[in-house]
């Protein structure tokens, strides 16, 4: 709820005094969660449970705000970042987000992680008119300002990413027979519908589609089913733990399809290394952020700043984990959004500023990819480049490909 603040001096409102003397000055304006000294931001992340590898994102964000506060904060205000473990469980997310909004009284939530988890709080956040900003999921539903004006995505949307893979399959795999492994929730469904749309009249090339539950101990049986189907293309829509299992199992059973892996599971440290570098060769994916294991960024100015920041604020953390780059980049965008708000730290102004980026160069984005938003476009990042796993890192190829939402 918006609160209106007025200062009264000797029984006369300050506004009246300004009006009578024709002196103009900027008035501070706050909603719940913001004061002269503090900005409260809420977050949920799976620090435990089946998707706990994503906990690296929450830890990076926490370190980022500590570094901002150490440098004086944002416009003189310290950021109070409150993050809770939801275990990648939607009911737990609902519980934690209600606590953030109703008890902790945050100004907004930021980078809450997971498609099913964000889906569980989507309507609640919009009914409460609390910004649900830069969510850590690429479902296309986060870019719907007409129906959900308080929710905005961050990364390229899953649907479009899958369309790009489908076009690449049709252009590069002779007589493609596609086997799909997907998580049995909105995350998996969004990618799968994009694959179907991208294939168009060739959708019958999908000859086998198997799913897994996030709580399943392994996906071994699903991978065996896909091999037995005769598929020569493996479209792998998996979270990091299951993605690594699937890559390793495919190698164990001698299945060597053209392998497409979704962007959320590209971490060298969290996925490719556990799967075995020898088992990961040739896997294809889409990138929008720089990868710290890619030698071409060795002398890159942004990468140098990031490495120095990691050494200072996350000593001992594995720089090969792409989740650290993701958390840093998302936090950088939130930082810039809050700076743009100035002294008008209302929920309405926060969304207004988030929806007014034009060709903004966000640290760690690939060259040629910029942040653009508007009141009718809630997809901040709308382009990717394809990459192939080679040796012990990803090798980018081709041009920047812009999504359909651009």
Image (spheres, rainbow, N blue to C red):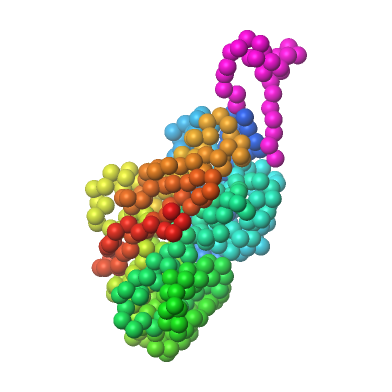
Residue 250 higher or lower than 397, as above or below: below
**Residue visible at 62% across and 54% down?**
147
| Residue nearer the viewer, 33 or 55 | 33
Provide residue 362's location: percent of width, then percent of height.
39, 45
Specify the farthest residue to the right. 11
182 or 99: nearer the viewer: 182
* Quadrant in which residue 195 is drawn: bottom left
- The residue under the point 52% across, 61% down is 139
Q: Is residue 215 visible?
A: yes
Q: Residue at x 34, y 71 (%)?
A: 168
Q: Is residue 144 left or right of residue 368?
A: right
The magenta stretch spans which residues? Answer: 1-28
The quadrant in which residue 402 appears is bottom left
Question: Quadrant of residue 390 in the image?
Answer: bottom left
Q: Residue 306 placed where, x, y %? A: 35, 46
Q: Where is the N terminus found, in terms of image quarters? A: top right
Residue 179 visible from this viewpoint: no
252 in relation to 47, above or below: below
Q: Is residue 26 magenta?
A: yes
Q: Is residue 321 magenta?
A: no
Left or right of 400? Residue 324 is: right
Q: How many labels sit on residues?
A: 0
Q: Position of residue 259 (x, y in %)?
A: 36, 75
Q: Is residue 176 above or below residue 148?
A: below
Camera-nearest residue between 362 and 70:
362
Task: Specify whether 206 is left or right of 390.
Answer: right
């Amino acid at each position: 709820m918006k609160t209106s603040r007025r200062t009264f001096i000797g029984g006369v409102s300050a506004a009246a005094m300004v009006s009578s003397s024709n002196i103009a000055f900027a008035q501070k304006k706050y909603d719940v969660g913001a004061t002269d000294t503090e900005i409260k931001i809420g977050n949920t992340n799976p620090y435990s449970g089946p998707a706990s590898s994503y906990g690296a994102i929450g830890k990076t964000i926490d370190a980022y705000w500590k570094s901002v506060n150490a440098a004086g904060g944002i416009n003189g205000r310290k950021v109070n970042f409150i993050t809770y473990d939801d275990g990648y469980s939607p009911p737990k997310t609902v519980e934690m987000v209600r606590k953030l909004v109703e008890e902790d009284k945050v100004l907004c939530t930021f980078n809450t992680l997971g498609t099913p988890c964000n889906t569980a709080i989507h309507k609640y956040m919009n009914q409460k008119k609390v910004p649900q900003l830069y969510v850590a999921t690429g479902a296309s539903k986060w870019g719907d300002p007409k129906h959900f004006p308080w929710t905005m995505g961050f990364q390229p949307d899953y649907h479009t990413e899958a369309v790009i893979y489908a076009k690449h399959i049709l252009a590069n795999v002779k007589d493609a027979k596609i086997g799909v492994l997907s998580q049995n929730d909105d995350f998996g469904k969004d990618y799968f519908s994009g694959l179907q749309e991208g294939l168009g009249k060739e959708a019958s090339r999908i000859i086998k589609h198997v799913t897994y539950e996030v709580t399943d101990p392994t996906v071994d049986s699903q991978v065996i089913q896909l091999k037995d189907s005769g598929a020569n293309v493996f479209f792998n829509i998996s979270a990091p733990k299951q993605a690594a299992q699937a890559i390793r199992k495919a190698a164990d059973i001698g299945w060597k399809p053209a392998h497409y892996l979704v962007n959320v599971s590209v971490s060298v440290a969290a996925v490719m290394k556990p799967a075995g570098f020898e088992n990961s060769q040739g896997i294809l994916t889409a990138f929008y952020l720089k990868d710290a294991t890619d030698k071409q960024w060795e002398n890159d100015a942004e990468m140098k700043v990031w490495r120095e920041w990691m050494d200072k604020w996350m000593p001992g953390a594995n720089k090969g984990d792409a989740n650290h780059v993701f958390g840093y980049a998302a936090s950088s965008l939130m930082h810039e959004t809050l700076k743009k708000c100035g002294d008008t730290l209302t929920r309405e102004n926060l969304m207004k500023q988030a929806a007014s980026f034009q060709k903004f160069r966000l640290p760690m984005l690939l060259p040629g990819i910029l942040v653009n938003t508007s009141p009718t476009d809630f997809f901040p990042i709308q382009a990717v480049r394809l990459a192939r796993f080679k040796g012990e890192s990803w090798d980018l190829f081709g041009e920047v490909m812009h999504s359909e939402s651009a």
